[in-house]
Amino acid sequence: RAGAMDFVAGCIGGAAGVLVGHPFDTVKVRLQVQSIDKPLYRGTFHCFQSIVRQESMLGLYKGIGSPMMGLTFINAIVFGAQGNAMRLLGKDTPTNQFLAGAAAGAIQCVICCPMELAKTRMQMQGTGEKKSTRKLYKNSLDCLMRIYKREGVRGVNRGMVTTLIRETPAFGFYFWTYDVLTRSLGCDSEDRYMIPKLLFAGGMAGIASWLSTYPVDVIKSRLQADGVGGVNQYSGIADCVRQSVEREGYMVFTRGLTSTLLRAFPVNAATFATVTLVLMYARGAQPAPTN
């Protein structure tokens, strides 16, 4: 029953996180994959303004179908797997939280990788157009089906190695940071400031998670966006790293970082606080009213 509740809480937390954070994610992907020779955007805020002006507010929510379906399910897997791993490890320590989080991060890559591939392709579709004249993909599912028909299972799992390299340590740091902060802040159900503390701990956990593996995410986005125009620029991970550094220097690994960190705090604050509160209510511990 405890395992099932972890899954349910993860589902609800995941949906809350997607609604809050998807516009920031669209900006992050656009900045990560834009051409250095003909850049469309000067930075995070210019990218936000350009998308809203050229593509309307809905432009910021391009590709939300994929993470709304996928991330909701992914969070269910992550929190469910992490909860079960903690029960197997037995002792609730920050180190075990890291190990359980890393295991959960690796497991959810099976869904995360195809979902992010569809999301990236949808986010790149109709760049700079208010009404896209030539839509390659109708929706996220159509996108994956077309990639599968053209490239098979390998195409749908493009970027899997980079996703594994990114997600495994990132989720370890995610749960470790949340555990350390909630312990030091003293978040218990009788604390009237419990919800603000949970939001802060969740937000900081998200930032720590992204900072730990961000350069890998840049390479993953580039590999997954590669071939959108019909031409493949990179032959693999090493080639993508080499070409990116040669053309843009090592600062390429910080592309879109501002947007990511702006997104990481509210998304993970919403996700972790929602999950924790759902689990508390399910277990009968009701938080005290807050100001």
Image (cartoon, rainbow, N blue to C red):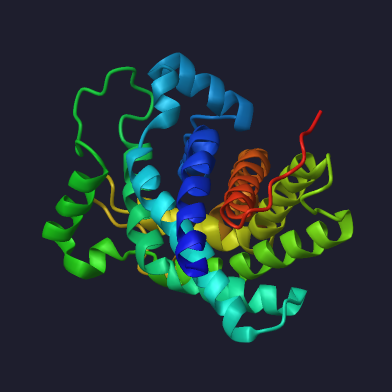
Query: Residue at position x 19%, y 55% from top?
Result: 147
Which of the pair 253/99 is nearer the observer? 99
Query: Residue at position x 37%, y 33% from top?
Result: 62
Query: Residue at position x 41%, y 30% from top?
Result: 61
Using the image, determine if residue 94 lies above or below residue 19.
below
Which of the pair 206/288 is nearer the observer? 288
**Quadrant of the frame with the C terminus:** top right
Residue farthest to the bottom, as pictured: 89
Q: State the image quarter where residue 210 is shown.
A: bottom right
Residue 153: percent from left, percent from top: 21, 68
Residue 71: percent from left, percent from top: 43, 51
Give the number of marks.
Answer: 0
Which of the pair 65/119 is nearer the observer? 65
Residue 214: percent from left, percent from top: 61, 58
Which of the pair 25/135 is nearer the observer? 25
Query: Residue at position x 60%, y 71% from top?
Result: 101
204 horizontally vs 172: left or right: right
Q: State the image quarter where residue 150 is shown.
A: bottom left
Q: Residue 79: tell me if it is visible.
A: yes
Using the image, determine if residue 85 lies above or below residue 113.
below
Q: Residue 243: tell me if it is visible.
A: no
Residue 198: percent from left, percent from top: 74, 47
6 horizontally vs 148: left or right: right
